[in-house]
Amino acid sequence: MSDKRTDGFTLIEIIITLVVLSIAAIGVLSVFATGMSGSANPLIVNKALQFAQGEMDAVIGQRAAGDFISITTGNPLACVTATPGFNCSRNIYYVTSGALNTSAGGPTNYKHITISVSSSTTGSISLDTIIANY
């Protein structure tokens, strides 16, 4: 025969189990909530990167058309296209072959191009390249 007092769980044991499980569930769900809030950010970063690459392609296309001289130098210049929600600037300056990151001031055979795209959610993304007049 079994004693009725030793079978099953007491009310205190059930309450303690529920409290422990609820604390564990809160910890697990907070990780999912953090992941869900940042899940759209890679899509926005990708869109900003595509926008910057399109601007870079426009400048490189101008050079490919054989028009190195008409690529306007300056800091900053307006971008060719506009995308809502993003700010864009183009920095183009002459450089020498020995100092590709330093402005040379006057005309040389090299230009350093920086395309910067920013938004309130992605921060700033920059693409750099050097083009030559050859």
Image (spheres, rainbow, N blue to C red):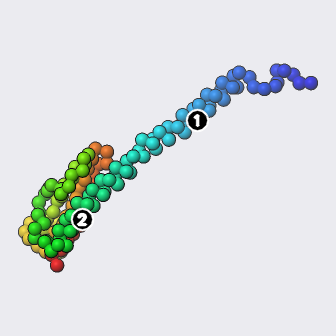
Q: CA distance from mark 2 to mark 1?
A: 51 Å
Q: Which comes before the other along the chain, label 2 or label 1?
A: 1
Q: Quadrant of the N terminus?
A: top right
Q: Is residue 23 left or right of residue 44?
A: right
Dividing the picture into quadrants, the one containing residue 8 is top right
Residue 65 image offset from top left, x and y in percent: 17, 72
Q: What amino acid type is highlighted by mark number 2?
A: Asp
Residue 90 image offset from top left, x and y in percent: 18, 58
Q: Nearer the viewer, residue 11 or 117?
A: 117
Residue 86 image offset from top left, x and y in percent: 25, 48
Residue located at (54% from left, 34% from top) = 26
Residue located at (21% from left, 68% from top) = 60
Give the SS element for disc 2: helix
Q: Is residue 27 left or right of residue 114?
A: right
Give the SS element for disc 1: helix
Dividing the picture into quadrants, the one containing residue 54 is bottom left
Q: Nearer the viewer, residue 92 or 106?
A: 92
* Residue with the mark numbered 2: 57
Question: Is residue 33 something that shows in the picture?
Answer: yes
Instruction: Classify mark 1: residues with Cα within 10 Å, few (<14), some (14-19) or many (20+).
Output: few
Instruction: Classify mark 2: residues with Cα within 10 Å, few (<14), some (14-19) or many (20+).
Output: few
Q: Quadrant of the C terminus?
A: bottom left
Q: Is residue 122 above or below residue 64?
A: above
Q: Is residue 89 above or below residue 23?
A: below
* Residue with the mark numbered 1: 24
Residue located at (21% from left, 64% from top) = 58
Question: Is residue 95 something that shows in the picture?
Answer: no
